[in-house]
Amino acid sequence: MSDRIYLVLLGAPGAGKGTQAQLLEEKLGIPQVSTGEIFRYNLKNQTELGQLAQSYYDKGELVPDEVTIRMVEARLAQEDAAQGAILDGFPRNLIQAQALDEMTAAHGGIDVVPMFQLEDDVVTLRITGRRVCRNCDRVYHLTFNPPRGENCDSCGGALYQRNDDKPETVQNRLYVYYKQTSPLIGYYFAKGLLEVVDGAKSIAEMQEQLLKRLASRNIEAAKSAVSA
Ligand code: AP5
Ligand code: MG
């Protein structure tokens, strides 16, 4: 029986996973769980996990599975994830996908896997213009989704450019995506969970499309958000 909602957002770097997850959180009442954000928090605070992740993160390589899987397991066990979670950036290979299946099996497994489809040259444009709030992690884009002033609209925090958004690292992140993560498209398609969303649409259009797809998959909170 499915007593929790687990969504997995799939898509290349810069496809809009984080942006859509932040918008969905409120509508669905379940938290975004972004492995990239957890790593960035630990890098910023120079924790043991941050020190371990640093060299992989800076090159755009995947942090080793055993570390990442343990981290997600601990995150999904937290109280705010008692109704489920929106997974953003996890899983990123088949080993992680199988681990997530095991973690969620007792709660009916994964419900839907929206996959954001986008051309590589648009991805690069998205990534180079991205700015992120150092305090609350809200994501902006200098052209497509600019803040009203110099700082974060939500909390006033300073905006910065991510370390791994340099052009040479972006190329490697795309390579890693195609090599290691894209096989998950087939994995979830075969399970009947995949919903392909047009990632080239505006942020608002993508959100609408996403909610409609989730509603069609019987996610109750999405049904009310669509009709609202
Ligand atoms: P992570 O932080 O997950 O990075 P990513 O997958 O490369 O994805 P991004 O965050 O770059 O893109 P996004 O799809 O979230 O796009 P966004 O919404 O920001 O991972 C970073 C690193 O951590 C990895 O390289 C790895 O080292 C490590 N890591 C993470 N997870 C791991 C795992 N599971 N295993 C091992 N290692 C892991 O949007 C991009 C920009 O476009 C923004 O500026 C936004 O404002 C703008 N935008 C968004 N939507 C639109 C739209 N519709 N129209 C116009 N602009 C838009
Ligand atoms: Mg992101």
Image (cartoon, helix red, strand yellow):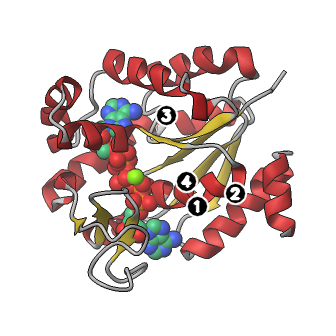
Q: Amino acid at mark 4?
A: Ala
Decide: few, some or many residues near mark 4? Use Cα within 10 Å; few <14, some 14-19, many ≥20: many
- CB within 8 Å, label 4 to label 1: yes
The quadrant in which residue 132 appears is bottom left
How packed is label 3: few (under 14 Cα within 10 Å), some, or many (20 or more)?
A: some
Give the quadrant of residue 206: bottom right
Q: Are marks 2 and 1 in contact (CB under 8 Å)?
A: yes
Q: Report the quarter where the C terminus lies.
A: bottom right
Callout 2: SS = helix
- Between 8 and 192, which is closer to the camera in this rendering? 8
- How far is the residue under mark 3 from the one under mark 2? 30 Å
Which marked residue is nearer to the observer: mark 3 or mark 2?
A: 2
What is the number of the mark on residue 183? 3
Tell which of 79 and 139 is nearer to you.
Answer: 79
Q: Where residue 65 sits: x, y (%)?
A: 35, 20
Closer to the chain start, of discs 1 and 3, is 1
Q: Which residue matches tag 1? A: 23
Which circle marks residue 27 in the picture?
Answer: 2
Query: How many numbered marks, from 0 up?
Result: 4
Left or right: residue 77 compared with residue 228? left
